[in-house]
Image (tube, rainbow, N blue to C red):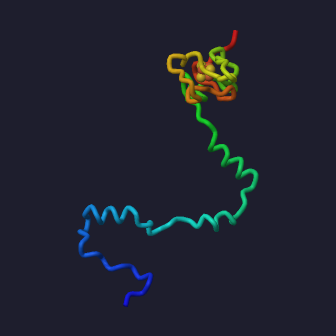
Amino acid sequence: MRKRFEPAPPDPGIKPGGIRERALRAVRPPADPGPDLVELAGGPVLTPAQRRALNKSGYRKCHGHAAPVGSGPAGETCGTCANLIRKQMARDYLKCKLMQAVWTGGYGTDVHARDPACRKWEKRP
Ligand code: SF4
């Protein structure tokens, strides 16, 4: 008699590499279930500095710059540029005037006032 949790012998009706075998493989749990999440939850606690570093990764990326960020004059930012537009909707959205042809309604074409200036930076009049 077979033990209760002993793996079942291969079914002679299932062809190796056939559709039934692939379907069975798809529903079987993976051999490596990954880390034990319950154990991880009781693990080491993050320091405030580590938590801040992790939160930075959630920072929304803005790609609305006219040229690579930081390629402009040192010490200048989009916030000091003549091309910065404040698009007023429910709140203000900062956009680069030179990129108006590709503006969308999303944050992907936004810029930040604190972003280092690009090489198309112009002094405000
Ligand atoms: S520095 Fe000026 S030109 Fe460059 S992306 Fe920012 S607002 Fe646009």
The residue positioned 28% from the left and 64% from the top of the image is: 20
The residue positioned 67% from the left and 25% from the top of the image is: 77
In x, y percent, where is residue 84? Answer: 64, 18
In the rendered view, tell whether residue 48 sits above or below residue 58. Answer: below
Residue 14 in the figure: left or right of residue 108: left
In the rendered view, tell whether residue 40 sits above or below residue 49. Answer: below
Q: Quadrant of residue 45?
A: bottom right
In x, y percent, where is residue 9? Answer: 32, 80
Question: In this orientation, which residue lies closer to the viewer: 36 or 55?
Answer: 36
Question: In this orientation, which residue lies closer to the viewer: 67 or 22?
Answer: 22
Question: In this orientation, which residue lies closer to the viewer: 79 or 4?
Answer: 4
The residue positioned 64% from the left and 68% from the top of the image is: 39
In the rendered view, tell whether residue 10 sits above or below residue 91. Answer: below
The residue positioned 69% from the left and 12% from the top of the image is: 124
User: Ligand 1 is in which quadrant of the figure?
Assistant: top right
In x, y percent, where is residue 26? Answer: 38, 61
Check the image and name the residue furthest to the top.
Answer: 125
> Where's the C terminus, which quadrant?
top right
In x, y percent, where is residue 23? Answer: 33, 62
**How many numbered discs?**
0
Residue 60 in the figure: left or right of residue 14: right
> Where's the N terminus, which quadrant?
bottom left
Q: Quadrant of residue 15?
A: bottom left
Check the image and name the residue furthest to the bottom.
Answer: 1
Residue 14 in the figure: left or right of residue 93: left
Check the image and name the residue furthest to the right.
Answer: 48
